[in-house]
């Protein structure tokens, strides 16, 4: 995109597009101190907006009304949304890029809020999922805790040298073990991985680069083990900023698909999974800077079960 713009600005300029694009990607992937300061601000203000939204959520409120509270708080901090907010109550959370935001939140439902702002063009990208009424049901909590475990394990792995694919393998393993424990997956972990049965419940990647774009540019590295469904195959370096965002979803179109039901008959308990459709899904997403030895999480919104319930009940 940047190269295209340069062509339009200086049509007579002679340059080799490919090395220039590579150079720009390399420069954009590793953030300077100033860029990090802007991203920290974006993440902090977006976090404040998440905390406010949690407190404002209640049964009877429309998704777009919650969005209005969120965006108002962003604007108060001088930020605009970095992407169209996903405000998804109940089963809407299973629509990965849900954007209508027109449904009414009901008691007993969870709300998935994937929303954030940008500061001088630098984006945050944050998701929380919380019970609209202030208390998770047992089922919701069980799914939530699996996703949280996967997210914390991913963040703990972030340091120079780790690949984004490593993060995906970690997420997949923890999510699968959790689903096996609950009886939503069956058989052995190896069988599940072999058939890729987890993709019915977790059909996306765990991480992408973050910066001037929400899905920012990167150079694809040659990684030792490539994971499925990842936009970026990147060996992490100091001052990369990435998201860590595992999730679990109950997607009607996949769970009711006869072909998938046949293919995954040995490893997925479809009868049980279909009973979870109302739950929708859970995603937990934070923005993480790679430091010299580990990581700094830029976003700060409650995510432990008790903290989340308390934040929602504050309203
Ligand atoms: N909000 C888009 C994403 O999480 O990748
Ligand atoms: Mn993201
Ligand atoms: Mn997101």
Image (cartoon, grey):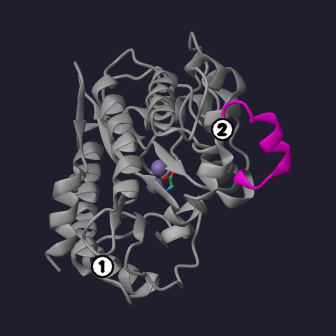
Q: Is residue 93 magenta?
A: no
Q: Which residue is mark 2?
A: 268
Of 254 and 48, nearer the camera is 254
Residue 103 on image: x %, y %: 52, 83
Query: Measuring 20% from the left and 66% from the top, which residue is drawn there?
Result: 48
**Secondary structure under the numbered disc 1 in the rendered image:** loop
Query: Furthest-top residue in view?
Result: 224
Crowding at mark 1 (Cα within 10 Å: few <14, some 14-19, many 20+): many
Q: Is residue 85 visible?
A: no
Crowding at mark 2 (Cα within 10 Å: few <14, some 14-19, many 20+): many
Query: Measuring 71% from the left and 26% from the top, which residue is drawn there?
Result: 195
Q: Is residue 312 visible?
A: yes
Q: Which one is earlier in the sequence, the residue at label 1 or at label 2?
A: 1
The quadrant in which residue 267 appears is top right
Of 22 and 119, nearer the camera is 119
**Secondary structure under the numbered disc 2 in the rendered image:** loop
Residue 261 on image: x %, y %: 78, 44
Query: Measuring 44% from the left and 51% from the top, which residue is drawn there?
Result: 212
Separation of disc 1 and disc 2 at Cα?
Answer: 34 Å
Q: Which residue is mark 1?
A: 57
Of 66 and 115, nearer the camera is 66
Quarter of the image with the C terminus is bottom left
Callout in the foreground (1, 2): 2
Magenta range is 255-267
Image-based side of 36 in relation to 113, left or right: left
């Amino acid at each position: 995109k940047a190269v295209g713009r340069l062509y339009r600005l200086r049509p007579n300029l002679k340059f080799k597009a490919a090395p220039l694009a590579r150079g720009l990607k390399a420069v954009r992937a590793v953030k300077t101190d100033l860029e990090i300061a802007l991203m920290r601000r974006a993440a902090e203000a977006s976090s404040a907006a998440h905390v406010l939204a949690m407190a404002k959520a209640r049964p009877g409120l429309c998704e777009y009304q919650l969005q209005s509270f969120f965006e108002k708080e962003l604007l108060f901090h001088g930020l605009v949304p970095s992407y169209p907010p996903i405000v998804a109550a109940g089963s809407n959370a299973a629509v990965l890029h849900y954007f209508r935001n027109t449904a009414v939140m009901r008691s007993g439902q969870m709300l998935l809020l994937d929303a954030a702002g940008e500061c001088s063009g630098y984006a945050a990208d944050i998701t929380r999922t919380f019970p609209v009424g202030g208390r998770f049901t047992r089922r919701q909590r069980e799914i939530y805790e699996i996703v949280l475990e996967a997210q914390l394990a991913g963040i703990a792995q972030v340091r120079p040298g780790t690949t984004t694919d490593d993060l995906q393998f970690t997420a997949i393993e923890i999510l699968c073990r959790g689903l096996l424990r609950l009886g939503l997956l069956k058989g052995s972990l190896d069988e599940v991985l072999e058939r890729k049965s987890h993709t019915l419940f977790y059909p996306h990647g765990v991480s992408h680069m973050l910066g001037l774009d929400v899905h920012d540019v990167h150079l694809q590295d040659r990684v030792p083990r490539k994971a499925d469904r990842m936009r970026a195959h990147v060996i992490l370096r100091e001052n990369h900023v990435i998201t860590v965002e595992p999730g679990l979803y109950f997607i009607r179109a996949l769970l009711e698909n006869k072909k998938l039901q046949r293919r995954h008959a040995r490893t997925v308990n479809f009868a049980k999974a279909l009973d979870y459709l109302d739950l929708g899904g859970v995603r937990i997403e934070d923005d993480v800077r790679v430091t010299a030895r580990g990581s700094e999480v830029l976003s700060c919104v409650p995510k432990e079960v008790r903290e989340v319930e308390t934040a929602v009940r504050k309203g």
